[in-house]
Amino acid sequence: MPRIAIILGSGSDMEIADQIIKALDKFDEAHDLQMISAHRNPEELDRYMRESDALVFIAVAGLSAALPGAIAARTDRPVIGVPVAKKLGGLDALLSIVQMPPGVPVACVGIDNGTNAAHLAMRMLRMHDNT
């Protein structure tokens, strides 16, 4: 069972996913990679969230960056958002991720910084391992 799920909003986010995977490989940490749009495939996202055993979710998204919030609304497990620079230098995605409503928390790393998302996920897992 992979403890980390990486979910991309679209195939154009694969470059960031590659950063995450490369960092997780250094920790020898298993992961599951999915491409599910919160807008185009909400039913598929619902199904995946119900069935996933992941302990931490990393959501990579640009533009409206709805994916991290959509995931956080479906789980009580930690969600890390990675904003992608598609428009406005990624500022639109960054602001979308950090301005979640109360009760729908999403951790956020820097724009295009998949490596930090992987490191943050590993720190979260270490806390889980120490309980």
Image (spheres, rainbow, N blue to C red):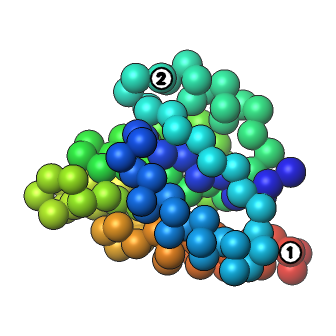
Q: CA distance from mark 1 to mark 2?
A: 33 Å
Mark sitting earlier along the chain (1/2): 2
Picture disc at residue 112: none
The residue positioned 66% from the left and 25% from the top of the image is 47
Q: Amino acid at mark 1?
A: Asp
Q: The C terminus is located in which quarter?
A: bottom right
- Crowdedness near tag 1: few (<14), some (14–19) or many (≥20) residues, C-alpha within 10 Å: few
The foreground one among 93 and 89 is 89
The residue positioned 48% from the left and 46% from the top of the image is 8
Q: Amino acid at mark 2?
A: Asn
In the figure, residue 45 lies in which quadrant? Answer: top right
The foreground one among 7 and 55 is 7
Picture disc at residue 129: 1
Left or right: residue 46 versus residue 94 is right
Picture disc at residue 41: 2
The residue positioned 49% from the left and 77% from the top of the image is 116
Tag 1's secondary structure?
helix
Residue 114 coordinates in the image, percent (x, y): 47, 68
The residue positioned 24% from the left and 60% from the top of the image is 85
Tag 2's secondary structure?
loop
- Extreme residue in the left direction: 88
